[in-house]
Amino acid sequence: MEVILNIDNSILDFLLSIRTEFFNDFFSLFSYMGNGGLVWIITGLALMIFRRTRKAGFILLLSIGITALINNFVLKNIIDRVRPFIADESIKTIIAKPAGASFPSGHSSASFAAAAILIKYFKKNGLFGLAAAIFISFSRIYFCVHYPSDIIAGAVEGIIIALIVAFAFEKIYSNICMNRLMKVKEKTTVYDGFTFEPVPDKIWNNMQGKSYPDKETVLNNKKVISRNELFYLNVLYFSFECELKAGEIICNRKIAKDLCKIFKKLYDRRYMIEKIRLIDNYNADDEKSMSDNNSSCFCYRNIAHTDTISQHSYGLAIDINPLYNPYIAKGRIMPASAEPYADRSRSFEHKIDKHDYCYKVFRSFGFEWGGNWENEKDYQHFYKKG
């Protein structure tokens, strides 16, 4: 402990020696932002306004709330470390002197808990949260209201708590949703023409040996999704001739309601999709289905030319207008007839990119897009992890 204290004091002495008016004003702003987790509470509440970000906002608020409880009612009382400006009365803090024990830093734990959640759910955009967490935490040692070790401990604590909270919430939420969906026994209408229901016998029988495997075709010893975990969907859409059509989809129960809402938005926008048929109409041949520009979801299979099982096998992925939005990997273009559409710098109809309405709608419901992959591209492919 003496070694750590010596290092802490050396760092604080250095920071005292480089204080300037500019730094004082700059870090005062960040220190104030972190008071009571103010900036993170505002961030969490803002995220909860929008459906797409609501879950992340709730987990963020829950995480910083738990860090505050653990810090103020457990760790600070047990360790009871005095703050630097109390241990050395010659130190001037400039900002208002906080009360309570020094270890761990509440500013730091809340900030890094929030940053961890932002990075987990928003990836690169979450780095802005990380930058704010670093500045807020550093401001606390700049003004000598915490030791550097208080900041490091708070950061580690915040990250661990955030990841545990996120993991636990995802598991509990997923189980609650699945339990509720498993109780659905009849057709449910989300909107007129947009329904989901347990897979009817006629459809189920037609899937056997095609999109749904027999025991001899199980891939990589991966468990086959059960019939009870799948839903049969009816959706309306506009064809390339702008004719109103009825489509059929088999998908995982977890995404059934979302897909109904997504296709309703596409329908309202008159977004054109050439075909939405079950892949069993093509004898579960993905190449034939894609070549016919058919949009489909469930099919128990590996990713093409790999030993990795596809998210389609779990009914968690759907391909939209695949002929115009091919899968490109290691020089292969699939379907093979999609070569004219492999050059994504070209402008053409039915092209899915980040400006396309279809992309925006799927992303707004939390779906990932294969067009964002780095080593390969799957421009037709929208999926949820699971």
Image: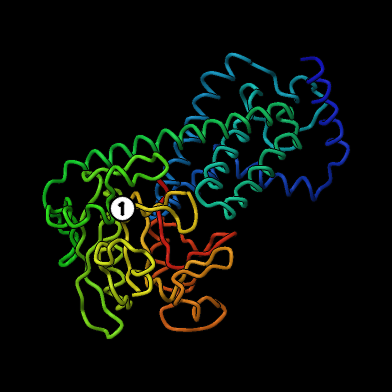
The structure's colour scheme is rainbow
Residue 255: give x, y in percent of width and height: 31, 53
Residue 377: give x, y in percent of width and height: 53, 64
Residue designated by label 1:
255
Image-quadrant location for residue 33:
top right
> Dot 1, crowdedness within 10 Å: few (<14), some or many (≥20)?
some
Relative to the observer, which residue lies in front, 358 or 307? 307
Tell me what residue is drawn at x 60 percent, y 41 percent: 34
* 350 vs 205: above or below: below
Left or right of 274: which side holds 310? right
Relative to the observer, which residue lies in front, 144 or 343? 343
Residue 339: give x, y in percent of width and height: 50, 77
Tell me what residue is drawn at x 32 percent, y 59 percent: 297
Residue 318: give x, y in percent of width and height: 36, 61
- Quadrant for the C terminus in the image: top left
Tell me what residue is drawn at x 66 percent, y 45 percent: 30
Left or right of 13: which side holds 63? left
Relative to the observer, which residue lies in front, 83 or 368? 368
Q: What element carries label 1?
A: helix
